[in-house]
Image (cartoon, helix red, strand yellow):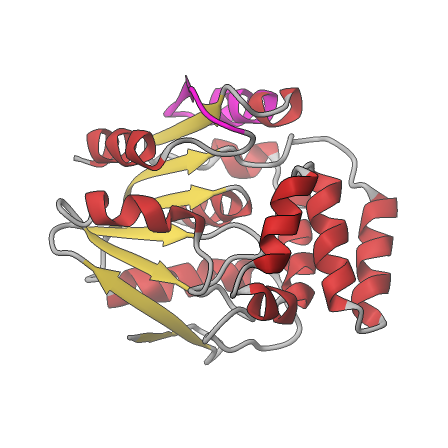
Amino acid sequence: MQARSADGTPIAVTRTGDGPALVVVDPAGAFHGLRPVAGAIPALARRFAVHTYDRRGRGDSGDTAPFAPDRETDDLAAVIALAGGEADVYGFSSGAAVALRGAAAGLPIRRVALLEPPFVVGQPADEEFDARLRELIGRGEHAAAVEFFNRAIGVPDEWIEQLRAHPAWPGIVALAPTLLYDAELTATMTAELLAAVETPVLVLGSGGSDDYLRGAARDVASRLPAGEHRELPGDWHGVDDAVLAAQLTGWFA
């Protein structure tokens, strides 16, 4: 399936299951070849029509320069329209920023669930991180940029080695320029934007994550007019697929 964003960019969409529409917004570095929510989709598809999509510049989706965070809101709007005109939305990590922007913009979203939005409102941008990432991408050192990004955000070294050995590694390297999109998306989240989200939002955190991510989840939930926070057992920046599916099913159903 394919949606078309407001600027004409084609967005590749996959639908699994039947029922009320549920749109999943991936984190940085994800696409159809490696999607963190993949393990939870079979359980979710028993209750929902799960719509996953390659965010712009990733996988089978197109891209249109220059990037702006509002364009990802337009992409989400196009996917929701394709899904039937109304949907629940789940966003993981930087995908949470897309989901929140969509809700704040008044898209037809029934409910939102997030797993560990990776930002703290009001925290200064890490200029050194941004400059180094931009430098690597500008020189065409995309594999190095992916590794730098992952290490900088705290991904364990053994996970990075597994990523390098994964069949999807060439596709992950190809989308390296979009890591700048994720950095801009999260750095430009504001208290005013969160306060404009009237949609009920469940913010999940993992007990196995670092203090920054766990604190960020609590902070985001506290700033939302209809926010609820839950911390679940899990690993760094993730929870078990069955646990996640159960939480999302209960919240959206």
Front residue of 137/90: it is 137
Rendering quarter of residue 84: bottom left
| Residue 117 sits above or below residue 188 on the image | above
The image quadrant where one finds the C terminus is top left
x then y, percent, for residue 33: 45, 65
**Could you say which quadrant of the image residue 175 lies in?**
bottom right
Q: Is residue 55 left or right of residue 48?
A: right
Residue at 42% of width from left, 28% of height from top? 203
In-front residue for pair 196/247: 247
Left or right: 239, with 14 as reference point: right
Q: In the displayed structure, would residue 195 be above or below residue 65?
A: above
Q: Specify whether residue 105 is painted magenta.
A: no
Q: Is residue 54 above or below residue 115?
A: below
* Residue at image location 75% in from the left, 42% down from the top: 152
Q: Is residue 62 something that shows in the picture?
A: yes
Residue 41's spot in the image, x, y percent?
27, 49
Question: What is the span of residues highlighted in magenta in the rendered image?
Answer: 215-235
